[in-house]
Amino acid sequence: MKPVLGALSVVLLGSLSGCGYIYGEDGFFRDRGSDYQAAQIQPRMSVPAGVESKPIGDLLPVPGQITGSEEYDKFNMPRPLALQVSADASEFSLQQNGSVRWVHSQRTAADTWPLVRQFWNDYQVPVASENAGLGELQTGWIALDTQTDNPLVRRIAPAAGEGRSLRDQEHRFRLRVEPGVQTGSSEIFVLHTSRSQGGNRDQWPETSDNRNLERAVLAEMESYLSQARADGSTSLVASQRGLGGQQATLDRDGAGNTVLNIQADFNRTWAAVGDALGRADVLVTDLDRSSGVYYVDLDQSASSQGKKPGFFGRLFGRGDKDEVVGRPLQVRLTQVSNGVQVTVEKGIETAAEAAEARTLLTRIRDNLI
């Protein structure tokens, strides 16, 4: 009882004497929000002679002392303005790592594809071939010296560089949209090649023939995407070219088990299925990228994992880890000749129940974008 009485005494004395002892100007938990007003300029730190050091710069340079009338001596330093964070920050940014450049998109590859496809339409650049499943597009040949009425040509031709002649040359670009490192993001790459007009060169180089033109197209695309909005026409394109629709269908294999066939490459399908599981609120307990398997638990939802029990729930509740018996399943992706096949299994040699597998695969298909 003595420790309890002692604690109550301290609380009582603190309440009687007010909060000044604890929270006042001289209190232990005093407000330090105005300490900057009493800050003083200290002389620059000097390094002793004979000691090597890196140059030390000012992170927050202080302007020179203000001279003038004495009214400045009574000036009250205002509180710094709060950091303004724009809610309309762009989802697209131009990135570079060494000689490699790309546009980073905070959208999935399926969401980004219709936007970049619309970019070429709006800039009146002919498209020679495209594969939405692979996220790849190749433009037709364009002449930068004669097609000056083309909107894209007018913008990128000056970036070709001094000493590079555009006469009697034709150019084309190859675009790739790949899943990004971060879940739900994607990366846009552009490759440039050129040849003499009427030439027969048809092979793509390892790196762009003109990096300046590559950078100009990426910069123009980043600006275009930052201003773009997913209006009705873009949504229509997405429904036609995304991973949903006709590219993802429920079928049956030879044994009669339900399978989800997706006409896309493995990398893009792996990212799309992971995103679909998240949107469907399916808990992914583990994954194995090399084996193409997502381990899921249908008895728990992904959204409920962030909700921890309160104090009394932990005190009187039973141990969740020991008592909860989930339904662990494997969502397996297998590369086939015409795309990727998604199946649901209990184990590598045991198929899941037919109704359970079909329900989960339907949820995945309905959440593909």
Image (cartoon, helix red, strand yellow):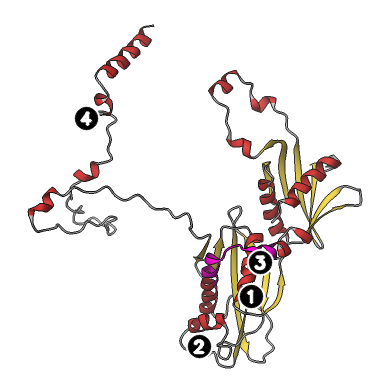
Pick whichever of labels 1 and 2 is earlier in the sequence: 1
Pick whichever of labels 1 and 3 is earlier in the sequence: 1
* Tag 2 near tag 3, CB within 8 Å: no
Read off the magenta span: 221-238
Q: CA distance from mark 1 to mark 3?
A: 12 Å
Q: Which numbered circle lies on residue 121?
A: 1
Which residue is pictured at 61% across the width and 54% down the height?
184
Q: Residue furthest top?
A: 1
Identify the secondary structure beneath mark 2: loop
Pick whichever of labels 1 and 4 is earlier in the sequence: 4
Which residue is pictured at 69% across the width and 88% down the height?
200
Q: Which numbered circle lies on residue 164?
A: 2
* Tag 1 near tag 4, CB within 8 Å: no
Q: Which residue is mark 4?
A: 26
Which residue is nearer to you in this view: 278 or 270? 278
Q: CA distance from mark 1 to mark 4?
A: 68 Å
Q: CA distance from mark 2 to mark 4?
A: 71 Å
Identify the secondary structure beneath mark 4: loop
Q: Which residue is mark 3?
A: 233
* Tag 2 near tag 4, CB within 8 Å: no
Q: CA distance from mark 2 to mark 3?
A: 39 Å
Indicate whether 11 appears above or below 181: above
Mark whose residue sits in front, 1 or 2: 1
Which residue is nearer to you in this view: 143 or 79? 79
Pick whichever of labels 2 and 4 is earlier in the sequence: 4
Q: CA distance from mark 3 to mark 4?
A: 64 Å
Which residue is pictured at 51% across the width and 72% down the height?
219
Residue neighbourhood size for the residue with mark 4, other residues' Cα within 10 Å, grouped as few (<14), some (14–19), many (≥20) = few
Identify the secondary structure beneath mark 1: helix
The type of residue carrying mark 1 is Asn
Pick whichever of labels 3 and 4 is earlier in the sequence: 4
